[in-house]
Image: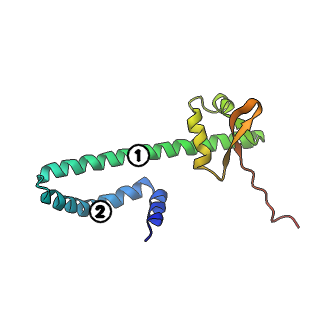
Amino acid sequence: MKPEVILELVRKASLFDIFIISFFLLPFVASQWIDILHKLDWSKAWGLVVMLVAYIIGIAVMLLGSRRDKQRETARDQILGYLTDKQFTMMSYERIREKINQGYDDAFLSALPVQFPNIFRKAKLKNSRAGLARLVVEDYSSEG
């Protein structure tokens, strides 16, 4: 299996899926690490402590990444809903903060087109203000 395929599967997996898989794989991985640490003359206790700390840090990083993705999905839904409701196609970062959420900074909003390239694109509005534009998908199948 190619590494790209494995990475794509991991990206699409839920936190629960990753936790369950890692939980069942942990004994096998732990035994391999214990063998390596034994060859390096480390004690099993220190090795287990290091592995446990690394596992906890990995779960914490995974949870933080999931939280960030959830925030971006919420922002996507809020902005898309506002644009659709008002029949707008573009919106400045200032207006997003004014009408939707004051906590969205420029870096966060700039990441949305990268995260959702089929929904948003970066836009320049009047007076060179930065903003987001909703991608409008036209239906060509109905044309004769």
Identify residue type, mark 1.
Leu
Name which residue lies at 51% across and 45% down: 70
Q: Is residue 137 left or right of residue 51?
A: right
**Relative to residue 136, is residue 88 depicted above or below?**
above
Is there a contact, CB below 8 Å, between mark 2 and mark 1?
A: no
Residue 85 found in image quarter: top right
- CA neighbours of label 1 inside 10 A, class few (<14), some (14 to 19), many (20+): few
| Residue that mark 1 sits on | 63
Q: Quadrant of the C terminus?
A: bottom right
Residue 14 appears at what percent x and percent y? 45, 55
Rendered view: 85 above or below 29: above
Element assignment for label 2: helix
In terms of sequence position, does the residue under pointer 2 or pointer 1 come before the other? 2
Q: Amino acid at mark 2?
A: Leu
Q: Reply above or below: 43 against 1.
A: above
Name the residue carrying label 2. Answer: 25
Left-right relation of 143 to 107: right
At x 49%, y 61%, the residue is 8
Residue 109: x and y in percent read 60, 38
Q: How many marks?
A: 2
Residue 82: percent from left, percent from top: 70, 39
Q: Nearer the viewer, residue 127 or 113?
A: 127
Image side of residue 101 versus residue 18, left or right: right
Alpha carbons under labels 2 and 1: distance apart = 19 Å
Q: Quadrant of residue 89?
A: top right
Taking the spot 18% from the left edge, 60% from the top edge, the residue there is 36
Q: Secondary structure at mark 1?
A: helix
Compared with residue 25, is residue 53 higher up or lower down, i.e. above or below?
above
**Is 25 left or right of 138, judged from the image as shown?**
left
Name the one closer to the observer, 64 or 41.
41
